[in-house]
Image (tube, helix red, strand yellow):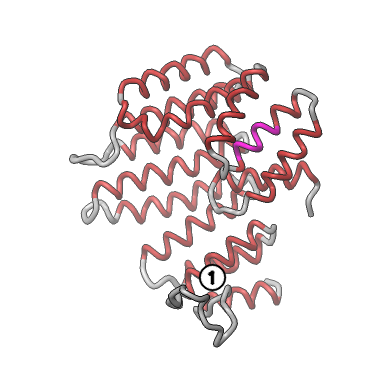
Amino acid sequence: MSLLRRSLATLALCCVPVLATAQGAPPATGQPARAPNPRADSLRAAQRIDAEGRHADARAIFEALIANAPDPAAKAAAQRRLAMSYGYDADCAKVIALEEQVIAYWVTRREVEPQNAHYQEGEMANEAARVCIDHGFLDEAERYYKRGTALGNMEPMPRTHPKSLWDFRLAHAMARIAARRGNAAEAQRHVAEARRILDSDPEMAKAQEQYFPYLLGYVALFTGDLATAEREFLKTTSAMPNDPFQVVLLGMTYEKMGQMAKATALYEKAYAASTGSNPPNVYARTFTKRTLGKP
């Protein structure tokens, strides 16, 4: 381990905030002083330097936070962030292994908070699947989307998330996977199923309808219907302006159309915005950094 990485890990081990204001500096006028939270500061610092490309240094912090977690919840939170770090390397297997550790934590919470625990288990499996599909590991993505659906649907009554939500997410995922495999007919069957599920549950659809144009655009992009892809991604980038992944998809569409100036401008926009620690941000950062030749 380099001297810098040892120093960063030591900061996490000693619970010293990595991101801290100057000592003695008063809070901004009208703003209450924030209570010190060294672990949260270290997590934020690690996520920031991860996005900057300093993955080894970020992982040294994450690993120290895992090793010295005060409780299982804190350990799982750091494991989840470490999983996303390996998403920058397109390391689907490592992401899955770490997300399984987070799932194992939520299994221990089933008795205390059964609805939330099952939901979180499904979310973590889907999160791993999302990293895998974006990097082209389609078999693993399919397996983990199905695992996420199964885990989420184990939620006992009274359910906080309906079966229709998980069914819609799975149909959405299977359509994207089919499109990536070049099977346009199968992709369209899953698109139709996703549409049917949304229409069958208007209450669930209130929050999920916004993801349907993304599905239409994604399937169109990967099956060669670029006019439809452009139309749908113009919708998604307007409806979800803070999602750099949607910006990347619109850029990909223009690149395939041969409109490189538009594509490059969108990739630059996505690169600047992709600082979060979740699958769409991680992939957008990885893709645009490689495409734009960023150091």
Q: Position of residue 36 (x, y in %)?
A: 45, 78
Position of the N terminus, as image quadrant, is bottom right
Residue 165 versus residue 192 in the image, above or below: below
Furthest residue in direction top, as rendered? 185
Q: In the drawing, does residue 117 fall left or right of residue 144?
A: left
State the residue lying farthest toward the front: 30
Q: Which segment did they paint magenta?
A: 245-251
Residue 103 image position (x, y, % from top left): 38, 50
Residue at the image position 42 percent from the left and 20 percent from the top:
195
Q: Magenta segment, principal secondary structure?
A: helix
Above or below, comparing residue 187 to residue 159 in the picture: above
Quadrant showing the C terminus: bottom right
**Residue 251, above or below 21:** above
Query: In this orientation, which residue lies closer to the viewer: 258 or 153?
Result: 258
What amino acid type is highlighted by mark number 1?
A: Ser
Indicate the position of residue 284 as horizontal and vertical percent values.
Answer: 64, 43
Residue placed most toward the observer, 257 or 59: 257
Q: Which residue is mark 1?
A: 42
At horizontal 77% and vertical 38% (from top left) the residue drawn is 264
Q: Count neighbours of disc 1 (C-alpha within 10 A) and say few if under 14, some if 14 to 19, many if 20 or more.
A: many
Could you say whether the residue bearing mark 1 is in a helix, strand or loop? helix
